[in-house]
Image: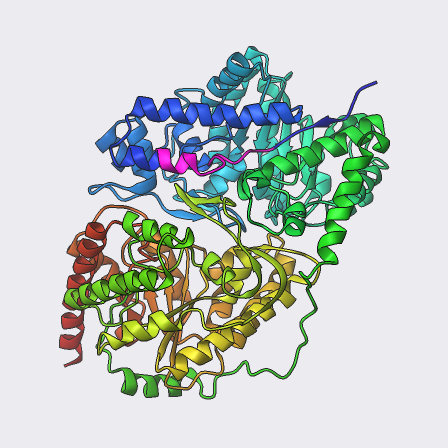
């Protein structure tokens, strides 16, 4: 009798303690050779495979490991790195790969944006006149490596052709079918070589299918897979979806593939299965363990879920797996030595999730009694957390103020009188470079090697230094630099009630940049001021305005691991009220420009468009709940990251922030086109240079970006700023780029004043 198998979609690439990050940055800094980098990252890759092997996963993914980003890997696979970096670095060199990701002094990086509704960033494929050609079959090489080094008959993973193209740019919707056909030929070549090598299963990731609204497009994608099937008739293909249920379930089940991967955690895949059934000639890869959150599963309920699935799919045609790649969760909770034991026991990181997958698989194959202790332990862990001091209570909606006293057109006049800013004011987004010395001092403080007073004095010295630097550069609105903060969400998680933070709970955000999402495990509330001392001190050093800097409620929610014991939007409103208290204290201390960052607002959009309105209404309500009680003369700023804003333009306006800055330097023209068809009535800054790249732009380059924006946006509404915080940049890069930005702003200002005179 065939047994139920276990599978995984992808494993974290960063290592238990971010070893991957350190290796990359050592290479970029010139401290590691390419050979040393490749050797060390190979060992890290094998460690991940070895763990999965030891945990007992049957179908282990290979090819999911990356030196930067799996979408960029796909561009490299098809010889589609941007021509500008190829000219400088060569076609297949590792430096061309990194240049596409990070840019060089002579070549701008590719655009970067969010991977569906996650905080992971991918490099946008540039597909204008694309001519994909496979030069080196990387999935085949990694399959061979796993087999030769560890005896693992792995499951190669590829970003699917429809997803890759749909996430790219440089082509029209009308060109999609032909472009897909062009790529299909190359995908077939890769798969044929894998089949000839003896690969049994290959995973082709097509999460884009969960977003497609058109039956015609589904038909075009199906034709692509029909061509692939004809080219490789014996290779077993699982078409993998995740992050949401699919819109065309019945059509998807007719694709000529051997398996279909569905997310049974997010969306309504079970309802689709009940309504439409499942074909008898296919295997269901059932994503039943949440790959995006860190809370332990109640395994008894998960076994019940799979037994329900078995009513519609024969047991021997079910493979158990996480709902998506485990790229989005930390590696292991075993390194967490400081957490409350009740809380730690209720957590499940990547390694623990795979153990949950294996436990469910064993229960289905051998009976639940064989793993009864583990099933009972999971239920007890969940119950203990629910019964602990980590309580969550529903939000009580009262008649809270969510409307500013005056409309924008009236209050902006009062703000201008008070702030006395020039035309085209310049500022930065918030954070300034955190050097090795800053991180070292923070670590010493956390280890109690230095006193609170010594640490505070060090932070003040950094603030003073950078206030002086900003004044010397000539910026109009300054920031204190956030030297006291580790991460823009974790910092608040350490200070608000209802949060806990981990020690090694890192996940990749973009490139080598990792974040440590806090755990929201209880009721969120304000305890004491969190940002006020640094803001007051910075403001005391200058006559120019210094922005108070907060992370907004939507971003804190979306960039945390949130328990689901109460509705998610109740937690959001709790966060909003806590931030409201902080804003009151800032304002009472004469901080009159306050930035409430919402870089994660758009990324939180459900993939199912039918759920958009509910999410956007909740996001707007929470932002206004945080900010609406300020005086008319207090100016509220916000900031948002790389995103396609045209679909949520109205909601952005409804936030009622006085000034919004948007991260756009890598996609400047795309966003400006949004403003061509939408009138924005408040003040706005479009990021004029890319902080994710170490290159220092020229005055002419930034001036060109400013001029393009001023063709659409009135100069009286326009701010000039980098496109994101400068925490990850070096001091020399930051100072050089800001000087260039201010020089370009001055040129633009002079031209505009001449026009007005």
Residue 183 colored in magenta in the image: no
Q: Does the image show residue 461? A: yes
* Residue 426 position in % (x across, y down): 24, 68
Residue depicted at 33% across the width and 75% down the height? 536
* Residue 72 position in % (x across, y down): 41, 36
Q: How many marks?
A: 0
Point out the image quarter for the N terminus. top right
In-image side of 609 versus 596 (left or right):
right
What residue range appears in magenta? 9-23
In-image side of 617 versus 277 (left or right):
left
Residue depicted at 40% across the width and 32% down the height? 67
* Residue 547 position in % (x across, y down): 33, 72
Point out the image quarter for the C terminus. bottom left
* Residue 84 position in % (x across, y down): 26, 37
Quick check: 595 above or below 486? below
Quick check: 125 above or below 618? above
Q: Does the image show residue 202? A: no
Q: Nearer the viewer, residue 101 or 558?
A: 558
Quick check: 600 above or below 366? below
Residue depicted at 85% across the width and 30% down the height? 367
Q: Nearer the viewer, residue 635 or 461?
A: 461
Q: Nearer the viewer, residue 505 or 121?
A: 505
Q: How is the image coloured?
A: rainbow
Quick check: 125 above or below 581? above
In-image side of 383 versus 696 (left or right):
right
Q: Quadrant of residue 618?
A: bottom right
Q: Nearer the viewer, residue 556 or 529?
A: 529
Prevailing secondary structure of the magenta residues: loop
């Amino acid at each position: 009798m065939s047994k139920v198998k276990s599978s995984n979609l992808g494993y974290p690439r960063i290592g238990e303690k971010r070893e991957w990050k350190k290796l990359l940055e050592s290479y970029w800094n010139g401290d590691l050779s390419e050979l040393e980098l490749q050797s060390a990252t190979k060992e890290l890759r094998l460690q991940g495979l070895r763990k999965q092997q030891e945990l007992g996963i049957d179908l282990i993914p290979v090819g999911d490991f990356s030196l930067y980003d799996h979408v960029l890997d796909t561009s490299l696979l098809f010889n589609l790195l941007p021509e500008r970096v190829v000219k400088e670095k060569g076609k297949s060199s590792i430096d061309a790969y990194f240049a596409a990701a990070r840019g060089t002094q002579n070549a701008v990086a590719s655009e970067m944006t969010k991977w569906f509704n996650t905080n992971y960033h991918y490099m946008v494929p540039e597909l204008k006149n694309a001519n994909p050609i496979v030069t080196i079959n990387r999935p085949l090489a990694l399959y061979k490596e796993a087999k030769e080094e560890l005896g693992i008959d792995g499951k190669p993973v590829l970003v699917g052709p429809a997803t890759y193209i749909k996430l790219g740019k440089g082509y029209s919707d009308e060109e999609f079918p032909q472009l897909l056909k062009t790529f299909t030929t190359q995908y077939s070549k890769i798969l044929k070589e894998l089949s000839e090598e003896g690969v049994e299963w290959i995973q082709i990731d097509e999460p884009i299918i969960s977003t497609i609204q058109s039956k015609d497009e589904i038909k075009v994608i199906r034709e692509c897979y029909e061509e692939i099937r004809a080219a490789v008739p014996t290779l077993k293909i699982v078409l993998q979806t995740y992050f949401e249920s699919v819109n065309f379930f019945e059509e998807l089940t007719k694709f000529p593939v051997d398996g279909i991967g569905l997310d049974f955690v997010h969306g309504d895949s079970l309802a689709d299965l009940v309504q439409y059934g499942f074909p008898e000639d296919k295997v269901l890869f059932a994503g039943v363990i949440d790959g995006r959150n860190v809370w332990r599963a109640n395994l008894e309920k998960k076994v019940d879920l799979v037994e329900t699935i078995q009513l519609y799919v024969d047991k021997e045609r079910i493979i158990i797996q996480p709902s998506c790649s485990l790229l989005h969760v930390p590696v292991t909770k075993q390194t967490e030595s400081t957490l409350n034991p009740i809380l730690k026991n209720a957590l499940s990181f990547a390694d623990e999730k795979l153990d949950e997958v294996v436990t469910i698989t064993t229960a289905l194959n051998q009976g639940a009694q064989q793993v009864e202790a583990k099933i009972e332990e999971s239920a007890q862990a969940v119950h203990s957390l629910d019964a602990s001091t980590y309580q969550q209570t529903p939000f009580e909606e009262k008649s809270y103020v969510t409307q500013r006293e005056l409309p924008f057109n009236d209050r902006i006049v009062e703000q201008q009188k008070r702030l006395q800013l020039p035309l085209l004011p310049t500022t930065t987004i918030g954070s300034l470079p955190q050097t090795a010395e800053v991180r070292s001092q923070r670590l010493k403080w956390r280890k109690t090697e230095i006193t609170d007073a010594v640490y505070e004095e060090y932070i003040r010295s950094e603030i003073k230094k950078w206030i002086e630097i900003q004044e010397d550069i000539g910026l109009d609105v300054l920031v204190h630099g956030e030297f006291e903060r580790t991460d823009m969400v974790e910092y608040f998680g350490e200070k608000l009630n209802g949060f806990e933070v981990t020690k090694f709970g890192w996940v990749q955000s973009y490139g080598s940049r990792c974040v440590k999402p806090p755990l929201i495990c209880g009721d969120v509330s304000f305890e004491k001021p969190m940002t006020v001392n640094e803001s007051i001190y910075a403001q005391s050093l200058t006559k120019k305005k210094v922005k108070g800097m907060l992370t907004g409620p939507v971003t804190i929610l979306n960039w945390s691991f949130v328990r689901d014991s109460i509705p998610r939007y109740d937690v959001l409103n709790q966060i909003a009220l806590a931030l409201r208290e902080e804003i009151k204290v800032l304002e009472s201390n004469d901080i009159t420009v306050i930035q409430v960052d919402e870089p994660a607002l758009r990324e939180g959009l459900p993939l199912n468009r039918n759920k958009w309105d509910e999410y956007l209404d909740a996001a707007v309500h929470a932002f206004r709940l945080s900010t609406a009680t300020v005086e008319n003369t207090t100016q509220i700023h916000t900031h948002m990251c790389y995103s396609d804003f045209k679909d949520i333009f109205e909601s952005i306006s409804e936030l009622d922030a006085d000034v919004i800055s948007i991260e756009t330097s890598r996609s400047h023209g795309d966003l400006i086109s949004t403003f061509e068809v939408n009138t924005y009535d408040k003040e706005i800054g479009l990021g004029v240079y890319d902080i994710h790249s170490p290159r220092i732009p020229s005055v002419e380059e930034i001036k060109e970006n400013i001029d393009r924006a001023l063709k659409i946006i009135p100069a009286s509404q326009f701010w000039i700023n980098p496109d994101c915080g400068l925490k990850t940049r070096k001091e020399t890069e930051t100072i050089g780029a800001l000087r260039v930005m201010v020089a370009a702003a001055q040129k633009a200002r002079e031209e505009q004043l001449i026009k007005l005179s």
